[in-house]
Image (tube, rainbow, N blue to C red):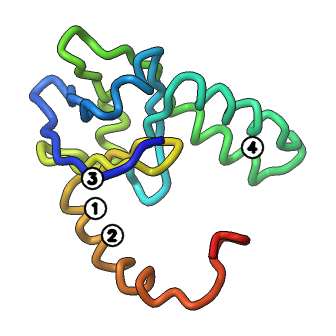
Amino acid sequence: MFLGTHSPKLDDKGRVILPAKFRNELAEGIVVTRGQENCLYVFSAAEFNDLHEKIRQAPVTSKSARDFLRVFLSGASSETPDSQNRITLPANLRQYAGLDRDLTVIGAGNRVEIWDTEAWNTYLAANEEAFSNTTEEVIPGLF
């Protein structure tokens, strides 16, 4: 499980060093793709394969399912960490997420999310109070 918040830097070649505590789970391969709210999702290869199997169950006759599948999978890139534990974030994904030098990498359970630091800070500021004040069940059976 991926947890925590980290602040790595993007180098001039579009590479990032993922946090050490995430490396074991990602050692067998990584898939990076577009995420919601203009961040990037990073999945282990195994988790991405499981997710893909679920996506494949969606009916081809559903326009919203087709749209989601196209955007989600067309941006996906299989990456392998180099000897210094860096992965390259493809230019189209960096552009999608508005990534510059300063990144925020968060653990989000089954995935890692990569955010532009300013975008993350804006998102967190806009959502932190609502999170603190949640008085109803958001996820069935959680609390």
85 up-or-down from 141: above or below: above
Q: CA distance from mark 2 to mark 1?
A: 5 Å
Cβ atoms at labels 2 and 1 below 8 Å apart: yes
Q: Amino acid at mark 3?
A: Thr
Q: Which residue is mark 2?
A: 123
The answer to which of marks 3 and 2 sits earlier in the sequence is 3
Q: Is residue 12 left or right of residue 87?
A: left
Q: Which residue is mark 1?
A: 120
Q: CA distance from mark 1 to mark 4?
A: 28 Å
Q: Amino acid at mark 4?
A: Arg
**Residue found at x 35% / y 33%:** 22
Q: Amino acid at mark 1?
A: Trp
Disc 2, SS: helix
Q: Residue 125 location, x and y as percent?
A: 28, 77
Locate the C terminus and report the quarter of the image it occupies.
Answer: bottom right
Q: Amino acid at mark 2?
A: Tyr
120 up-or-down from 115: above or below: below
Checking the image for residue 5, the label placed there is 3
127 up-or-down from 73: above or below: below
The answer to which of marks 1 and 3 sits earlier in the sequence is 3
Q: Which residue is mark 4?
A: 66
98 up-or-down from 127: above or below: above
User: Which quadrant holds residue 90?
Assistant: top left
Q: Residue 16 location, x and y as percent?
A: 21, 30
The answer to which of marks 1 and 4 sits earlier in the sequence is 4
**Residue found at x 43% / y 36%:** 42
Disc 3, SS: strand
